[in-house]
Amino acid sequence: MFKKVIFLSVLISFLACNSSLSTKEIENYTVKGKEITEASFLELSNNLMTQMKMGGPSQAISFCNLQAIPITNQLSEKYNVTIKRTSDKIRNLDNKSTQRELQLIDNYKNEIAKNAELKPIVEVDDAKKIHFYAPIIVQAKCLTCHGKLNETVNVQTDSILKSLYPNDKAFGYEEGDLRGIWSITFKN
């Protein structure tokens, strides 16, 4: 009987220490996550559009290859988080998805198939780290590098992509498709 009481006490203590978040905490992390993803998107897309204007897709692709991760790393430091853009069809192997991220991508795809509203997700992992996830939807301007060959991606652009990203899977998209997700881990 004594062992059962100790076991139940330990179990109750464990459950009480569970890292679930209150509704208010989820709201706060959602607001912060949205702020970070919006700032990150603006920084990346503004830089890419500048490069596109200066030298077309070849310059934008080269810039992205060398600068996208350093830009997200700078923003990660600024916001005291880890920022990652990932997909089930990655271009840069440094953005490889975790199993959880792949599950969320599948969930978002299912939501799109049902015409449901896509909402960000805030959750706590087993290591008690807080994560924010949000969908990345393909916009028309993304199709120059992420669209279909001979439709929105020309042969020259495809050649540049293949030379810089030999394992590239991030193409064949249409406007409105799920490109991937933002994955943000808060450093507590």
Image (tube, grey):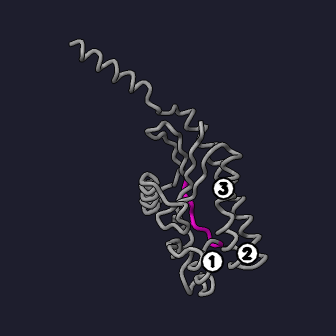
Left or right of 99, for residue 158: right
What range of the chain is rendered magenta?
A: 134-141
Specify whether residue 5 is painted magenta: no
The first of marks 1 and 2 along the sequence is: 2
Q: Callout 2: helix, strand or loop? A: helix
Disc 2 + disc 3, Cβ < 8 Å: no
Q: Name the front one of labels 2 and 3.
A: 3
- In the image, what residue type sits under mark 2? Met
Which image quadrant for residue 104?
Answer: bottom left
Q: In front: 163, or 17?
A: 163
Label 2: how many residues lie within 10 Å, few (<14), some (14-19) or many (20+)? some
Residue holding disc 1:
144
Residue at the far right: name it.
Answer: 54
Q: Secondary structure at mark 1?
A: helix
Alpha-carbon span between mark 1 and mark 3: 22 Å
Q: For residue 72, which numbered disc appears in the image?
A: 3
Q: Secondary structure at mark 3?
A: helix
Q: Amino acid at mark 3?
A: Thr
Front tag of 1 and 3? 3
Image check: 129 left or right of 42? left
In percent of width and height, residue 167 lies at 50, 73
> Percent position (x, y) of residue 82?
60, 48
Dividing the image into 4 quarters, which one contains the C terminus?
Answer: top right
Q: How far across and down, in percent of the image, does residue 162 sit?
A: 56, 79
Looking at the rendered image, the quarter that the N terminus falls into is: top left
Residue 95: which quarter of the image?
A: bottom right
In the picture of the structure, the residue carrying the numbered disc 2 is: 52
Q: Amino acid at mark 1?
A: Thr
Query: In the rendering, at what x and y percent does residue 48 appear?
Result: 71, 68
